[in-house]
Image (cartoon, rainbow, N blue to C red):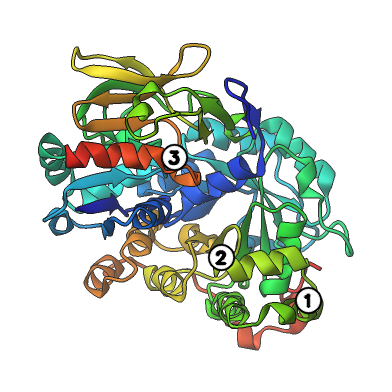
């Protein structure tokens, strides 16, 4: 604990605290400073600085890596809200570079091509906080055990199909509800079963929620998608390709922000969903070959 | 006593949890009509640009100003910015408090910090009044307290102002809602009671 008058930086409380300030908000993928300004103007709580949105990463193929620091810096200079950027799973040097740039949050992301097929980054080593993806409670708690200060359910990025985001959020939140009903002597066996640290399983049971903030991501494209995820019980949403691959990004972005705040108010949801222009084209996940799915990346 | 927490965006759930722990009826406020019947209001931490835009979009600016002229309002971090009359930037502000704030005054997230603060005013709710453990996240600074009726409640060692009060209006750069220490909330409730 900080002594009187002496500042303590980079504590877990401060790292997880920034995610708490983002709650009830929308984090938007942007690829240019101009996009970042549109996102901020629409009411985004943060932007994710990328060279290509996930839909284009899919279309482009090849190895997807951390974005050019020059681009990230342009985006940081363009807005007053927090700026996040992605690194490849396990690529701790990309994370060191983002820390040196002063990015506000690092996303160790399955959207990029993994750099390590067994290990994630030891996130405790860093002053900047990390957000990581998960598909279930065990994966979420493994990432928190490694030092993640924020979690997002993965969904299937770049598809515009919300089905996987729903599956992963239901999985995490449903498992927590079942955990709350377990007796204490069942927790060790459960921790072993879901391959999660025992202490974090115990803490999650006591809190009745993940020990850190949990957003939804991967395939959200409409205000209704955002409100759906909020009603399922996540703390906020990431929207990637869904905004800047749509017909009218500024209008759609503002509508998704409003829908995330008023997620329980169908009249407002109806009003903001009106006349938004073309949504992103999208790609149905049930037709997608297994090898094209990216949510399976992460261990 | 019934306290509202502005729930447009940010860590409103954390404020609601502290208020409920203190046995106070606490409700979420997203639309103007939800201010009716409240005895006080907390504006939480979050992104001040987002909170301001949503307040504009749903006709909350004037109702919030009218509320703050009659009843206690406390803003933490983004909420403090929203209460101020000047944030040195073009964004929607309530202008209820005669303070000038500087957003992200300490730098980016890597510069966020925790520190123990001496806050003499908290003696009102805590006899021993040990240091208050304060969490600063991409925090604003209160550059100046600009009216005779407004006072400074807390400073950092370097003299930077991080908490101010003007009548029954409170602004803190930091987040008492992230601690288990409920003294700042208790202090706000004395303003509601008084």
- For residue A67, say whether it is visible: yes
Q: Helix, strand or loop at disc 2?
A: helix
Q: Is residue A213 left or right of residue B155?
A: right
State the mark number for residue B140.
none
Quadrant position of residue B175: top left
Residue position for label 1: A188
Task: Give the chain letter at badge 3.
Answer: B
Question: How far is mark 3 from mark 1, CA to CA?
Answer: 35 Å
| Disc number for residue B176 | 3
Which quadrant: the C terminus of chain A? Answer: bottom right
> Compared with residue B4, is residue A200 higher up or lower down, i.e. above or below?
below
- Front-most of residues A110 and B71: B71
- Label 2 – label 1 distance at C-alpha: 17 Å
Is residue A11 or residue A18 the one in the foreground? Answer: A11
Label 3's element? Answer: helix
- Looking at the image, which residue sits at the far bottom? A286
Q: Is residue A138 above or below residue A26?
A: below
Discs 3 and 2 carry the same chain letter: no
Q: Which residue is mark 2?
A: A207
From the viewer's perspective, tell me whether residue B146 is left or right of residue B132: left
Q: Is residue A180 above or below residue B82?
A: below
| Image x and y of residue B177, in percent | 44, 45
* Viewer-side residue, B104 vs A280: B104
Subunit of label 2 = A
Q: Residues within 10 Å of mark 3 (few under 14, many from 20)?
A: many
Residue A264 drawn at (x, y percent): 31, 71
The reply, left or right, for residue A220 in relation to residue A69 is: left
Asked if marks 2 and 1 touch (Cβ < 8 Å), the reply is no
Q: Are marks 3 and 1 in one subunit? A: no
Between the residue at mark 3 and the residue at mark 2, the CA separation in whole angstroms equals: 19 Å
Q: Position of residue A162 (x, y in %)?
A: 52, 76
């Amino acid at each position: 604990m900080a002594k009187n008058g002496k500042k303590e930086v980079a504590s877990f409380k401060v790292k997880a605290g920034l995610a708490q300030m983002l709650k009830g908000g929308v984090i938007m993928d942007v690829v240019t400073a101009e996009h970042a300004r549109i996102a901020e103007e629409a009411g985004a709580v943060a932007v994710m600085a990328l060279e290509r949105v996930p839909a284009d990463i899919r279309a482009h193929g090849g190895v997807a890596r951390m974005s050019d620091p020059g681009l990230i810096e342009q985006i940081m200079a363009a807005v007053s809200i927090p700026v996040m950027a992605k690194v490849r799973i396990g690529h701790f040097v990309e994370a060191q570079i983002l820390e040196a740039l002063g990015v506000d949050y690092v996303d160790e992301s399955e959207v990029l091509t993994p750099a390590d097929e067994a290990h994630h980054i030891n996130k405790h080593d860093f002053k900047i906080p990390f957000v990581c993806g998960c598909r279930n409670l065990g994966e979420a708690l493994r990432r928190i055990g490694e030092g993640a200060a924020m979690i997002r359910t993965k969904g299937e990025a770049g598809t515009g199909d919300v089905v996987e985001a729903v599956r992963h959020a239901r999985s995490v939140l449903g498992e927590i509800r079942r955990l709350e009903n377990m007796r204490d002597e069942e927790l060790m066996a459960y921790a072993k079963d879901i391959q999660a640290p025992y202490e974090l399983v115990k803490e999650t049971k006591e809190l009745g929620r993940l020990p850190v903030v949990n957003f939804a991501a991967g395939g959200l494209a409409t205000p209704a998608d955002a409100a759906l995820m909020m009603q399922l019980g996540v703390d906020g949403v990431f929207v990637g390709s869904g905004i800047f691959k749509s017909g009218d990004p500024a209008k759609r972005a503002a509508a998704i922000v409003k829908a995330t705040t008023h997620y329980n108010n169908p009249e407002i949801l109806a009003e903001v969903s009106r006349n938004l222009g073309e949504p992103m084209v999208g790609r149905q996940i049930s037709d997608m070959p297994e090898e094209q799915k990216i949510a399976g990346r992460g261990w | 006593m019934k306290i509202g927490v502005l729930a447009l965006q940010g860590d409103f759930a954390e404020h609601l949890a502290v208020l409920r722990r203190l046995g106070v009826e606490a409700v979420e406020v997203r639309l103007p009509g939800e201010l009716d019947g409240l005895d006080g209001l907390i504006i939480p931490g979050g992104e001040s640009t987002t909170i301001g835009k949503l307040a504009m979009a749903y006709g909350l600016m004037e109702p919030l100003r009218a509320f703050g002229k009659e009843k206690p309002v406390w803003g933490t971090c983004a909420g403090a910015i929203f209460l101020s009359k000047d944030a040195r930037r073009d964004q929607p502000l309530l202008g209820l408090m005669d303070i000038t704030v500087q957003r992200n005054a300490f730098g980016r997230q890597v510069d966020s910090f925790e520190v123990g603060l001496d806050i003499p005013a908290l003696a009102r709710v805590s006899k021993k009044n040990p240091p208050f453990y304060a969490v600063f996240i991409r925090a604003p600074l209160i550059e100046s307290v600009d009216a005779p009726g407004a006072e400074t409640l807390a400073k950092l060692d370097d003299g930077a102002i991080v908490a101010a009060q003007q009548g029954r209006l409170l602004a803190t750069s930091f987040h008492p809602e992230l601690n288990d220490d409920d003294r700042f909330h208790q202090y706000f409730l004395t303003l509601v009671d008084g």
